[in-house]
Image: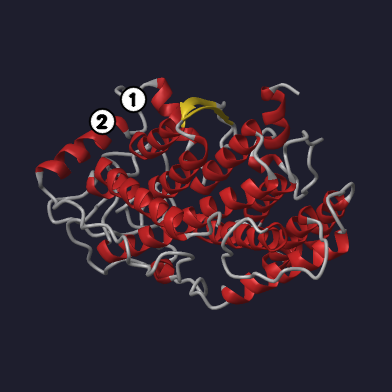
Amino acid sequence: MNRSLLISTIIGTGILSINNTFALQPKPANADVIVQWNLITVKATKIAKQNSNLASRTEAVEAIAVYDAVNSIKHIGTPYHYNVEPSGPASAQAAVVQAAHDVLVNYFPAQRPALDSALTNSLQGITDGPVSAGREVGAAAAADIIVLRANDGSSPLTTYAGPEKPGVGAYRPTPGKFAPGIDVEWGNVKPFLLKSDKQFLPEPPPAIGSTEYKKALAEVNELGEIKSTKRTEDQTHIAQFYKQDAELTVNEGARLLAVSHGTTLEENALIFVLVDIAEADARIEIWGGKYKYLAWRPVTALNAEEDGSVKAYTKWTPLITTPAHPSYPSGHSATVTAGYEVLKKFFGDKNHLELRTTTDGEPARVVESLSAVEFENGYSRIYGGIHYAFENNSAQDVGRKVADWVLKNGPHKK
């Protein structure tokens, strides 16, 4: 099977083109059950309409269950938490399928019929050992991490309506729905691997009126306006392509690389657990910064009066609708940087990728390095008019620090 066909087989035409089903296309030989169930997991989070915070948590829990299940049978290296060796031979593939299935059914009970069908399909043809024994290991690993994360602070979630009389620099709800800021407490969620939810809290943003702030504001004013004549056609495509939830970009990259490099089941178990933990912990760190600094969005700054009030949002409109949470730092930038920095450690930087997952019908983004994905994803927020450059830079710094910590302190080969 040639590479382009192989990629389209795994990825499909778009993450949201599914009709509440998890049926997979005919799979190439090197698209193992970990790759398949990562895609099923990502689809399940979007069917459930989980935002990126919740989805990254789900993906991390699923990846941990899968890793600990495989590790219990194959002895890859250090466990994340669960580590009970089966009494006899057991299928690692069956363990993967059962672990992933049980995590998803726990979080998305309404999707059980489709998930059960996917489980049955995946179990057919498994020949790497006793299936029943493998399923028992997978079920135990899933149950273990579900209990471990049961009281991690991820629910309930509250919103932020903004101050009664917001001043200069203060965040407040933005057009078009003027929805309150989401997930106020997400910065207090227990990290998966970091020592604390404030371990890599970013420094404060530059002061309003400072040289750095003025430069960044002028840049987003010029490049991010809906009818900008300075933004190129390709920059507009970048803004529209990457406006999808950031964890989609991370997991698609991981799947593409796993397939193109032909990584083994054991290798994929380790790769996906580290990638998904990194993106989840990066979002926790970033959310702590968002609600600590409560910085206003460009659309507010560029429509504000001298006293910080906004009479009407008519002076300036961004290309992309502004997300409902404070501006500093960028969650998108941290998420993708954290995930792709982990991927670099396994696959190197220079890789040809055709990213196709998008929520907006955009054509594929073709890149020749993982650093290019980090750059495009980060600057897409400036091209879209919803972030300043310093927010992207600060967030990418957090993403790199989180990735480095996860690689040094997460599960690893013995």
The location of residue 193, given as percent across then percent down, is: 46, 64
Is residue 196 left or right of 169 when viewed as pictured? right
Res. 378 visible in picture: yes
The location of residue 212, given as percent across then percent down, is: 14, 42
Res. 159 visible in picture: no
| Along the viewing direction, whichever of 287 and 143 lies nearer the viewer | 143
Location of residue 289 with respect to 245 vertically, above or below: below
Lower sequence index among marks 1 and 2: 2
**Category of crowding for the residue at label 2, using alpha-carbon neighbours closer than 10 angstroms: few (below 14), some (14–19), many (at least 20):** some
Location of residue 240 with respect to 65 vertically, above or below: above
Q: Which amino acid type is marked by label 2?
A: Glu
Name the residue located 61 percent from the left edge and 35 percent from the top edge. Answer: 256
User: Would you identify the image quadrant in which residue 180 lies?
Assistant: bottom left
Is residue 407 left or right of 73 when viewed as pictured? left
The dot on residue 231 is: 1
In the picture, the quarter occupied by the C terminus is bottom right
Is residue 307 left or right of 260 when viewed as pictured? left
Q: Which amino acid type is marked by label 1?
A: Arg
User: Is label 1 in contact with label 2 (beta carbons under 8 Å)?
Assistant: yes
User: Would you identify the image quadrant in which residue 406 lies?
Assistant: bottom left
The location of residue 159, given as percent across then percent down, is: 42, 68
Residue pointed to by mark 2: 222
| Along the viewing direction, whichever of 57 and 299 lies nearer the viewer | 57
Secondary structure category for the residue under label 2: helix
